[in-house]
Image (cartoon, rainbow, N blue to C red):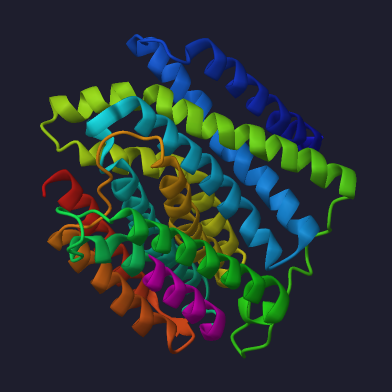
Amino acid sequence: MLRVLLARWTVLVPLLAVVALAATWGRSLPGAAVTVVVVALVGAVLSAVHHAEVVALRVGEPFGSLVLAVAVTVIEVALILTLMTQGGDKAASLARDTVFAAAMITCNGIFGLCLLVGALRRRVAVFNAEGTGAALATVATLATLSLVLPTFTTSKPGPEFSPAQLAFAAVASLALYGLFVMVQTVRHPDDFLPVEADGVVTGDEHAEAPSGRAALAALALLLVALICVVGLAKVVSPAVESAVESAGLPPSAVGVVIALLVLLPETIAAVRAARRDQVQIGLNLALGSAMASIGLTIPAIAVASIWLDGPLVLGLGATQMVLLALTVVVGGLTIVPGRATLLQGGVHLAVFAAFVGLAASP
């Protein structure tokens, strides 16, 4: 009976979120309506996590980890493009701020939470160093090519790429992301599967795979829920902007809040995987989301720049580059042994806390 009620709840909530999104889109909301939208947003997040796990059980790992990461990122890119077309010069750094925030949230926040939960459960969190190291190396390369180099190039003034440089960054990002997906799913999928403490590769033997029909229904509901997550996040963004302005915080803090909302489904799914002793799946979600955020956003922005007016600021500032470098170094040292304790999880969460603090007070 409980399972039936849960199934009905996960179907009903995305539909209610659609109604809430349709009723509030493009409108100025009073305080009570904002509360209703936030409740619908949380419900859509929880529903998205449930349906993503159903699809993941059907397709298996490592394909399952790609489902939620790619779905969220594609919709996130659409949201960025929508805001950029409406924001004009004020949105010049929107893509950079959003992508960097996503990278810090995933590579430190979600990554650290997975290690912390895994270590709390079994004293030591174990994962596959080969696959996780390859993922971090790809994220570091994508971030450097797309977000660090624009600060130092001289063909165009300011932290911007010239059209030729932007085209190269877009092609390189898309090629690297496609190559990683091919390696993860075709050439070396075992490198991205969960491992036990003795290093033996394991699958998810305890969960029964749903039928194909159930998986397709879950996929459709997942997409609906994710669209509602991003759409409702945009609906509440004016209230967030007002709150940020009233608190005297910088405008970039808005991007951090919106990124946190959009990445909630992946955060919950990753932590739940870590609680099931599948830390590797959580790390796949974290690094895969960071990779997809850069590898798909930069090509989309490059194409959109053909008709977008105004500057496109991609280069990171000095503080952001220090945080990115620290993330890569700490992440590399964490991954090399293939096992982590509470300390490593705490270190990553400390870097994430520094990012949040500096976003609020640069």
* Residue at position x 14%, y 24% in the image: 246
Relative to 251, does residue 191 appear above or below in the rendering?
Answer: below
Considering depth in this image, is 124 or 287 the residue closer to the camera? 287
Count how many numbered circles sit on residues in the image.
0
Along the horizontal axis of the image, is 75 left or right of 301?
right
Task: State whether residue 125 appears in this view.
Answer: no
Quarter in which the N terminus is drawn: top right
* Residue at position x 25%, y 72% in the image: 325
Along the horizontal axis of the image, is 7 left or right of 276?
right
Along the horizontal axis of the image, is 182 left or right of 40?
right
* Residue at position x 34%, y 53% in the image: 163
Task: State whether residue 47 appears in this view.
Answer: yes
Relative to 283, does residue 134 appear above or below in the rendering?
Answer: below
Instruction: Report x, y in % for residue 134.
Output: 50, 79
Considering depth in this image, is 39 or 130 the residue closer to the camera? 130
Quarter-of-image position of residue 60: bottom right
- Magenta span covers which residues? 129-142
Considering depth in this image, is 151 or 308 the residue closer to the camera? 308
Instruction: Report x, y in % for residue 316.
Output: 22, 57
